[in-house]
Image (cartoon, rainbow, N blue to C red):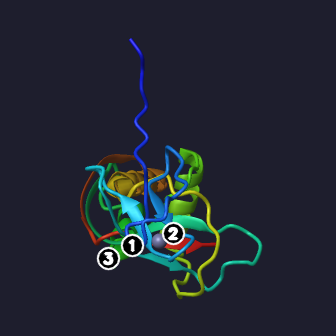
């Protein structure tokens, strides 16, 4: 039995120029007309807006991230009664937070490190000129799962004996940003 890999010809949705797409990529920018597009879970190519940070250094590829606003309603039970960590958690999630999920190929460790750092101290999002960026291999469909993973990681890292964490996450539509 032969195993076949289906490589569908990918053409720009606006000008039909062939896009040199790698197998694991999920979003592209047409080098001819500048149209940006992404692959959906259903296998369709749809328009997808790319935002480029003003802070991208020249000569270095930017890193693509899915950025989504999230409101987290947390129920947290530690073995202490209402401990300091519970208070910190209530305080932290009392405002909407911006999730930054790497859309480029990076390990879970890096995703956790950047994800938690930027959840606490988000980088500014000001739009600048288009620039070169790393291949986009993580689709918007995975953003929620990664965001939930980050919430659990943050809560588990608080200095107390957390017993149980429950939360509801209300999430906005992820936007693609190219960041330094
Ligand atoms: Zn095009």
Q: Give the mark nearer the N terminus: 3 vs 1.
A: 1
Residue 1 at least partly seen: yes
**Where, quadrant-wise, is the N terminus in this rendering?**
top left
Q: Is residue 72 left or right of residue 14?
A: left
Q: Give me the residue at 29% from left, 50% from top.
A: 41
Q: Residues within 10 Å of mark 1 (few under 14, many from 20)?
A: some
Q: Residue furthest right?
A: 59
Gap in angstroms between the C-alphas marked 2 and 1: 9 Å
Q: Which residue is mark 3?
A: 94
Q: Give the mark nearer the N terminus: 2 vs 3.
A: 2
Q: Nearer the viewer, mark 2 or mark 3?
A: 2
Q: Which residue is mark 2?
A: 30
| Mark carried by residue 14 | 1
Q: Give me the residue at 47% from left, 69% from top.
A: 119
Q: Nearer the viewer, mark 3 or mark 1?
A: 1
Q: Are marks 2 and 1 in contact (CB under 8 Å)?
A: yes
Badge 1 residue CB within 8 Å of ligand 1: yes
């Amino acid at each position: 039995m032969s195993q076949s890999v289906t490589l569908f010809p990918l053409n720009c949705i606006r000008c039909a120029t062939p896009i040199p797409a790698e197998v694991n990529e999920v979003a592209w920018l047409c080098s001819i007309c500048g149209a940006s597009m992404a692959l959906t879970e259903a296998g369709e190519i749809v328009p997808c807006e790319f935002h480029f940070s003003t802070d991208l250094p020249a000569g270095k590829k930017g890193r693509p991230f899915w950025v989504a606003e999230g409101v987290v309603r947390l129920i947290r039970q530690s073995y202490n009664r209402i401990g300091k960590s519970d208070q910190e958690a209530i305080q932290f999630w009392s405002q909407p937070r911006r999730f930054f999920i790497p859309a480029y190929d990076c390990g879970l460790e890096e995703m956790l490190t950047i994800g938690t750092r930027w959840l606490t101290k988000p980088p500014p999002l000001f739009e600048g000129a288009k620039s070169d960026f790393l291949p986009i291999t993580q689709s918007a469909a995975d953003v929620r799962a990664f965001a939930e993973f980050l919430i659990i990681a943050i809560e588990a890292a608080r200095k107390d004996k957390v017993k149980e964490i429950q939360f509801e996450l209300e999430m906005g539509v992820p936007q693609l940003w190219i960041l330094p």
